[in-house]
Image (cartoon, rainbow, N blue to C red):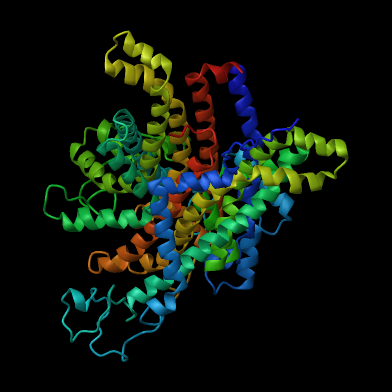
């Protein structure tokens, strides 16, 4: 088992090096002059020369890559954004929680509902509920995220306005509702210069967690309400995929002999379907859940645009168009590393779920 | 001795036409209702695209202000047959913010969408096939270099990588199309590689080697044609995905530029008006959904039809 995990981790190393190189190259090939993108079109040549010198942009490319590697790997510093005049790590601490909250709630929604729908339609195979679920799944996979997002806004913020189903169309919290960080509520004094501060403010920026641990029920309810529409928008494609995969995996398992045996033994139907059937059909579902988490990050660019959320995807998109390449580097690095990490976890969780992989 | 001649009736043999994998596949495909529905949707859209100039009452980019009396921007659909007063000009899908007939724009959008989808997937398949086939066939360090490179590509979420590529190339429909092709290459390369790995161990390929056939000829003449089936499914599903992703890039302002009648761009142009003029957002949005649905249904059908191991009743 340990050997298997070690092998997986070692295999990820060349990919990580490739990612570092790719993010570095990416930022260098984005056309345009970084100086004028930051300081404006009217910056004089002298000002720009000084700017390039200060940021190490006049060095040859291999040396720039060396500086970059040293910064990331040794100093663990992602640089400072020209546009914001702030360290990239601070911006990540502020905006990553938005996306994490969105991705996790979308995934919880998609997995729970997807597995339930998959089980129901596999168990009542070819029934009306099965056909309806599969038609719904096909439509869910085909509808673009940005259209679905707008449709949800239209239905829940306009058509259902003034009913109890009304939901806010954008943002994270209604203005006027405050959600003070838990470390301030608890009276901790944290030095803003330390990485502990980055960590606690990251947690505090997860609105729901923060509201939960500070027992701020008004903020909790409001944050949840704001989260429903974007989470449904991002979660619909994974939901449809999970429902289909669960259905076909469970259908295959339920036709096997040992299930007949289990029934012949007189086991309760619930035990047969869930303990004997579902637990053996879960492997492909885990793969899909893991893979979809990565796609959620991409879907986040569109969803965050529509729902006006200042998250990772939205910030990255704006940084690319503004040629703020320090942010581009930092954010793509975080996303790609997160993606590799998730794949690693998926691979390892296989081994727990399926002894054949562990032993081969 | 007279020999009796007896005539023996030749037994009537009923022979079944030998049927190939593809013939079988087509037969299974048309038995599947969802696949047929997919084909009908796509056929209808292809016809709309082909006959766009005949179907569309107006030029998709023509601004009708001053041309047509009483035209109002963002006016709701007006269909005379459904009781819209006859003194108002007929616009089946209404009028957009620039006084253009929205129906004509949506119709022309079908052209762009289908062309973009096919083009993006064709480029990706050709490149991906060459890379994957060479990697799988040659193996060794070539395989390692190509596939690790593909892994790096796959480490980035597709849309984000595409956004980055478009930023390098500059916004525009062609560049968006190229970006989406580049991003999807690894998927095709992987599929072809694993398929080639399976085929190259078979006896008829070993026979080629024994006969001294040059390796590249073995690859292109004997290995590839036998390894290509999985690509058909992947490619069909891929067209749908490519269409959505190009539309998404246009939605973000990186793809088609105004006044091009591109569905993603049309959704984006009016998205702030979604509460006042929902038809301008949802009609092109549903059009994207429909074309993607068509490719998905057909792709799923092909997947079952081309799988000889699948148990059929």
Residue A322 visible (yes or no): no
Name which quarter of the figure residue A183 lies in.
top left
Horizontal side, residue A174 vs residue B20: left or right: left
Horizontal side, residue B27 vs residue A262: left or right: right
Q: Say which residue appears at 47% left-offset and 44% top-offset.
A: B28
Give whichever of A33, A255 is nearer the camera: A255
User: In x, y percent, where is residue A343?
Assistant: 53, 34
Location of the C terminus of chain A by quadrant is: top right
Give whichever of A352, B9 is nearer the camera: B9
Location of the N terminus of chain A by quadrant is: top right
User: In x, y percent, where is residue A120?
Assistant: 29, 31
Q: Say which residue appears at 42% left-offset and 40% top-offset.
A: A192
Name which quarter of the figure residue A6 lies in.
top right
Give whichever of B262, A299 is nearer the camera: B262
Give above or below for B272 relative to A54. Answer: below
Horizontal side, residue A211 vs residue B139: left or right: left
Give above or below for B83 relative to A352. Answer: below
User: In x, y percent, where is residue B70?
Assistant: 23, 88
Give whichever of A206, B137 is nearer the camera: B137
Name which quarter of the figure residue B42 lies in.
bottom left
Residue B261 visible (yes or no): yes
Q: Say which residue appears at 34% left-offset and 41% top-offset.
A: A134
Report the residue that reaches farthest toward the right.
Answer: B212
User: In x, y percent, where is residue B227?
Assistant: 66, 42
Give above or below for A282 relative to A172. Answer: above
Q: Say which residue appears at 30% left-offset and 57% top-offset.
A: A150
């Amino acid at each position: 088992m340990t050997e298997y995990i070690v092998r997986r981790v070692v295999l990820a190393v060349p990919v990580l090096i490739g990612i570092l190189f790719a993010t570095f190259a990416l930022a260098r090939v984005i056309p345009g002059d970084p100086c004028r993108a930051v300081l404006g079109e009217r910056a004089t040549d002298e000002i720009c020369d000084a700017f390039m010198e200060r940021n190490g942009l006049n060095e040859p490319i291999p040396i720039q890559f060396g500086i970059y590697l040293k910064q990331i790997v040794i100093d663990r510093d992602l640089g400072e954004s020209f546009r914001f005049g702030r360290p990239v790590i601070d911006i990540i601490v502020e905006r990553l929680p938005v996306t994490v909250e969105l991705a996790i709630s979308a995934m919880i929604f998609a997995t729970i509902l997807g597995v339930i729908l998959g089980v129901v339609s596999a168990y009542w195979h070819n029934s009306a509920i099965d056909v309806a679920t599969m038609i719904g799944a096909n439509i869910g996979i085909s509808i673009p995220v940005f259209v679905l997002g707008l449709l949800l806004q239209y239905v829940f913020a306009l058509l259902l306005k003034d009913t109890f189903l009304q939901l806010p169309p954008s943002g994270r919290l209604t203005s006027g509702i405050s959600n003070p960080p838990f470390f301030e509520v608890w009276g901790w004094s944290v030095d803003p210069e330390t990485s502990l501060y980055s960590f606690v403010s990251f947690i505090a920026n997860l609105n729901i967690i923060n509201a939960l641990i500070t027992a701020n029920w008004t903020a909790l309810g409001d944050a949840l309400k704001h989260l429903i529409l974007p989470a449904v928008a991002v979660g619909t494609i994974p939901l449809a995929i999970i429902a289909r995969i669960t259905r076909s995996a469970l259908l295959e398992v339920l036709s096997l002999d040992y299930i007949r045996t289990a029934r012949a033994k007189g086991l309760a139907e619930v035990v047969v379907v869930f303990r004997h059937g579902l637990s053996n059909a879960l492997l492909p579902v885990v793969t899909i859940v893991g893979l979809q988490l990565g796609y959620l990050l991409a879907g986040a660019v569109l969803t965050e645009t529509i729902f006006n959320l200042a998250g990772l995807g939205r910030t990255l998109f704006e940084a690319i168009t503004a040629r703020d390449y320090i942010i581009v580097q930092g954010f793509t690095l975080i996303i790609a590393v997160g993606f590799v990490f998730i794949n690693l976890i998926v691979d390892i969780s296989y081994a727990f779920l399926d002894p054949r992989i562990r032993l081969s | 001795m007279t020999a009796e001649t007896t005539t023996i009736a030749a037994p009537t043999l009923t022979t079944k036409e030998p049927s190939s994998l593809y013939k079988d596949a087509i037969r299974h495909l048309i038995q599947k209702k969802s696949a047929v529905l997919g084909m009908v949707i796509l056929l209808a859209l292809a016809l709309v695209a082909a006959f766009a100039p005949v179907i569309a009452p107006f030029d998709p980019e023509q601004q009708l202000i001053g041309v047509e009396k009483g035209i109002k921007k963002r006016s709701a659909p007006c269909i005379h047959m459904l009781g819209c007063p006859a003194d108002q000009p007929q616009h089946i899908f209404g009028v957009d913010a620039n006084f253009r007939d929205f129906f004509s724009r949506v119709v022309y959008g079908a052209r762009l969408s289908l062309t973009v989808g096919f083009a993006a997937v064709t480029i990706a398949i050709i490149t991906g096939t060459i890379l994957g086939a060479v990697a799988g066939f040659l193996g060794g360090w070539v395989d390692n270099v190509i596939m690790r490179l593909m892994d790096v590509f796959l480490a980035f979420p597709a849309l984000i990588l595409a956004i980055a590529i478009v930023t390098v190339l500059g916004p525009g429909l062609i560049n968006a199309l190229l970006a989406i092709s580049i991003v999807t290459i690894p998927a095709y390369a992987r599929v072809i590689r694993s398929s080639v790995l399976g085929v190259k161990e078979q006896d008829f390929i070993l026979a080629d080697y024994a006969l001294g056939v040059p390796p590249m000829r073995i690859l292109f003449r004997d290995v590839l044609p036998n390894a290509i089936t999985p690509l058909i499914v992947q490619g069909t599903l891929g067209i749908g995905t490519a269409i959505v992703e190009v539309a998404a890039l246009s939605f973000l302002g990186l793809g088609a530029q105004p006044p091009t009648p591109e569905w993603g761009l049309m959704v984006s142009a009016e998205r702030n008006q979604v509460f006042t003029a929902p038809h301008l957002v949802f009609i092109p949005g549903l059009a994207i959904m429909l074309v993607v649905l068509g490719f998905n249904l057909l792709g799923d059908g092909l997947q079952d039809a081309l799988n000889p191991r699948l148990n059929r009743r």
